């Protein structure tokens, strides 16, 4: 992620910290650390922590054996040995701060240790401030997200000719999708939900041993990490020719998806995208069966701000990136979801995924 201006991002963070009366921000595992440094902490019992003081240079505390994997970094680094206490080192570095932010995904064992060393400090999640920066993507971030989206678009285009559904398990199809996600340029396939027939009624179904058969609708929701940024796409396939009901449910979801896209623009409240998509599904009589929000932000994490959900009156701004993913889930029978990633622009929407949203028949 060398193309990003990490020191510039830290300066903007320090400005916001100053405005909020925050003395230090501590970043460990999670996406904030790579956002500000380009380095991602190993999620282990050995503490990696970036200390960002409100004024002055950040210091990355890192286990001595992991220092070689950091590579070129534009910040001071302190490596601690196996017999040292990293909590004490970090506590000492922030001992003059009354108000401290800590990364949302930092392990509680580290936070509790720091709280014991710094009993007078007050604590808050780092996202209270870091989201202000991460929620609006820089042009290079949008291009990274577009590359990721195009990667899964290419995988989707291969599905009808390369993936057999009927007679195979959901797990088999999930493995195919993950393999193609990597073949199409992702570093790693992060997830591949395959929910067939009645399992489609569970939006986050864990693909299992159910054997897919003719007449099933199959929700395929998959994505991965591409140069640090995530893809996340969903298409619902029909194994054999769809029934009239399957075709109807799919067309309602497609219309809801299209309505969501049409509503996007700067100054539009996040909840408005949810409302317009939900209205289409309500009007068709399926309102009780759209059981999740319409979308989530995406970037260095698959789910991040902004959330397209009732009650979120945050206004969309150019550079915000998010999914639009309405669905209908009929218990014990079937499910349909259609999901794409888009960016809000100066005057509307930029669709990062380009894959066709129609109901595709597979074998
Ligand atoms: Zn989901
Ligand atoms: Zn998804
Ligand atoms: Zn999603």
Image: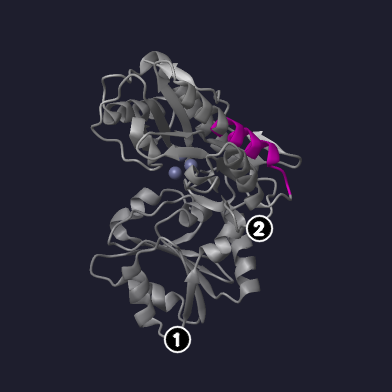
Q: Earlier in the sequence, mark 1 or mark 2?
A: 1
**Visible in this render: residue 27?**
yes
Find numbered disc 2 in the image and state the secondary structure of the residue it sits on: loop
Q: Which residue is mark 1?
A: 120
Report the residue at 42% width, 55% height from top.
Answer: 30
Residue furthest bottom as drawn: 120
Residue furthest front as drawn: 285
Up the image or down, 230 lies above or below 216; here it is below
Find numbered disc 1 in the image and state the secondary structure of the residue it sits on: loop
| Placement of the C terminus among the 4 image quadrants | top left
- Of 40 and 224, the residue lying toward us: 224
Alpha-carbon neighbours of circle 1 within 10 Å: few (<14), some, or many (≥20)?
few
Residue 313: mark = 2
Q: Which range is magenta? A: 253-266
Report the residue at 38% width, 79% height from top.
Answer: 115
Up the image or down, 362 lies above or below 197; here it is above
Residue 199: mark = none
**Visible in this render: residue 140?**
no
């Amino acid at each position: 992620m060398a193309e990003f201006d990490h020191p510039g991002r830290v300066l903007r963070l320090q400005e916001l910290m100053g405005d909020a009366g925050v003395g230090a921000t501590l970043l460990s595992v999670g996406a904030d650390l790579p956002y500000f440094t380009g380095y991602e902490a190993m999620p282990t019992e050995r503490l990696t922590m970036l200390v960002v003081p409100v004024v002055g240079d950040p210091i990355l505390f890192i286990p001595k054996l992991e220092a070689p994997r950091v590579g070129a970094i534009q910040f001071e680094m302190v490596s601690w040995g196996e017999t040292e206490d990293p909590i004490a080192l970090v506590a000492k570095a922030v001992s003059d701060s009354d108000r401290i932010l800590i990364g949302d995904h930092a392990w509680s064992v580290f936070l509790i240790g720091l709280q014991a060393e710094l009993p007078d400090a007050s604590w808050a999640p780092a996202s209270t401030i870091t989201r202000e920066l991460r929620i609006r993507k820089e042009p290079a971030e949008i291009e990274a997200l577009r590359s990721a989206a195009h990667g899964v678009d290419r995988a989707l285009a291969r599905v009808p000719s390369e993936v057999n559904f009927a007679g195979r398990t959901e797990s088999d199809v999930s493995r195919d999708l993950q393999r193609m996600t990597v073949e199409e340029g992702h570093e790693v396939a992060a997830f591949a939900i395959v929910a067939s027939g009645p399992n489609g009624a569970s939006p986050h179904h864990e693909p299992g041993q159910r054997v897919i058969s003719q007449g099933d609708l199959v929700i395929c929701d998959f994505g991965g990490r591409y140069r640090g940024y995530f893809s996340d796409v969903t298409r619902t396939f029909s194994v054999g020719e769809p029934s009239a009901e399957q075709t109807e449910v799919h067309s309602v979801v497609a219309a809801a998806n299209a309505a969501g896209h049409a509503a996007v623009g700067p100054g539009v409240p996040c909840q408005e995208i949810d409302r317009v998509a939900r209205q289409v599904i309500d009007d068709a009589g399926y309102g009780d069966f759209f059981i999740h929000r319409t979308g989530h932000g995406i970037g260095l994490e698959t789910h991040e701000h902004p959330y397209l959900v009732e009650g979120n009156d945050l206004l969309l701004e150019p550079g915000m990136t998010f999914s639009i993913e309405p669905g209908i889930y009929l218990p014990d029978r079937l499910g349909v979801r259609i999901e794409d990633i888009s960016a809000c622009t100066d005057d509307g929407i930029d669709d990062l995924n380009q894959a066709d949203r129609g109901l595709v028949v597979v074998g």
